[in-house]
Image (cartoon, rainbow, N blue to C red):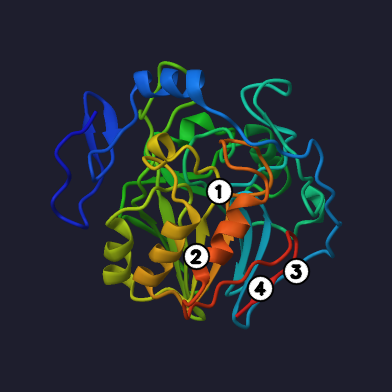
Amino acid sequence: MKVAPTDHPFAGARRIGGRFVNKSGRALTRGDVWRLLRTHNAAPWPEHIPGAQADKPVERVTDGIRVTPMGHATVLLQVAGLNIITDPMWSQRAGPTSWLGAKRRCPPPLALDDLPPLDVVLLSHCHYDHLDRATLARLEQRDRPRLITGLKVGAITPCHNVRELDWWHSDTLGGGVTVTYVPAEHASARGPFDQNKSLWGGFVVQAPAGTVYFAGDSAFGEHFAAIRERFGPPDLSLLPIGAYLPRWFMSVVHMDPHQAVEAATILNSRVTVPIHYGVFHLADDGYHEPLRTLEAALAGRDLDVRVPEFGTAVHL
């Protein structure tokens, strides 16, 4: 299905028949999903990927920007004295039950209780590998953080202090920090009947120490140029590189590593850290493919792309 794209680069999300649509108008159909199920050929992954336990993060950061990838799309962002986490996921499966869904192959580098107190959760969209109710419930009980997400996502969560945003709308935090929900090219669903009834997107975090862009899940699109135009070059971009094969299907919802490099170039990001790889076997690409393809895509490019081990901080 394709509908007419949204013309204005800073327009909010559109809905057709109660369902959100991408700015480009691209969308997968049920026929595409059935074709994928019949024809996909997934490369093998290890059943268990050993991961070293990381040191506990510092309690607070007031000097600069500190990000610690925790695996998949979960990143601890510490800036201006605030502790912010993106798409927190500590469960053993990304699915509707503890026994159904994609199995975690790589353990988290830290126990959930080893995280510092969390002030804010940034939740990009409702897919099971990003919105994990079990993890959110534990964080709600422990820290009661503010949760910022897209339209119609809050009711899916077990959290109480929720702020839902349309694309390009903002929320102000303490310490001179502003969070803006920005477009992505993706989709949403938790079951067979709620496709695209809640919004998807990424976040731009503006702080005195600099600007951080978390893309969430996204295909390649014109929104990267719009984000650069609106906010200037990010000091740090967190861009997804995994779950990208087969391209006929995944190109509608996920970038491949070559496109992630192109997105970093368009954004003119000072530093880029890849996310969304190496934890859940969600598509046909093999375990090593995203990072190997990223390395090939970076050949001859003058880009500062850093690939820390999960649990290892990058401090700008």
Q: Disc 4 designates what residue?
A: 314
The residue tagged with tag 2: helix, strand or loop? Answer: helix
Q: Earlier in the sequence, mark 4 or mark 3?
A: 3
Q: Residue at (81%, 50%) from the top-left corner? A: 113
Q: Position of residue 116 (x, y in %)?
A: 74, 60
**What number is the disc on residue 59?**
3
Q: Disc 1 designates what residue?
A: 242
Spatial CA span between label 4 and label 2 = 22 Å
Spatial CA span between label 4 and label 3 = 15 Å
**What number is the disc on residue 28?**
none
User: In the image, what residue type sits under mark 4?
Assistant: Val
Front residue (pair 206, 53): 53
Q: Position of residue 208 (x, y in %)?
A: 48, 80
Spatial CA span between label 4 and label 1 = 20 Å
User: In the image, what residue type sits under mark 2?
Assistant: Ala
The residue tagged with tag 4: helix, strand or loop? Answer: strand
Q: Quadrant of the C terminus?
A: bottom right
User: In the image, what residue type sits under mark 1?
Assistant: Gly
Q: Earlier in the sequence, mark 4 or mark 1?
A: 1
As drawn, 136 above or below 314: above
Q: Earlier in the sequence, mark 2 or mark 3?
A: 3
Front residue (pair 273, 155): 273
Q: How many discs mark residues in the rendered view? A: 4
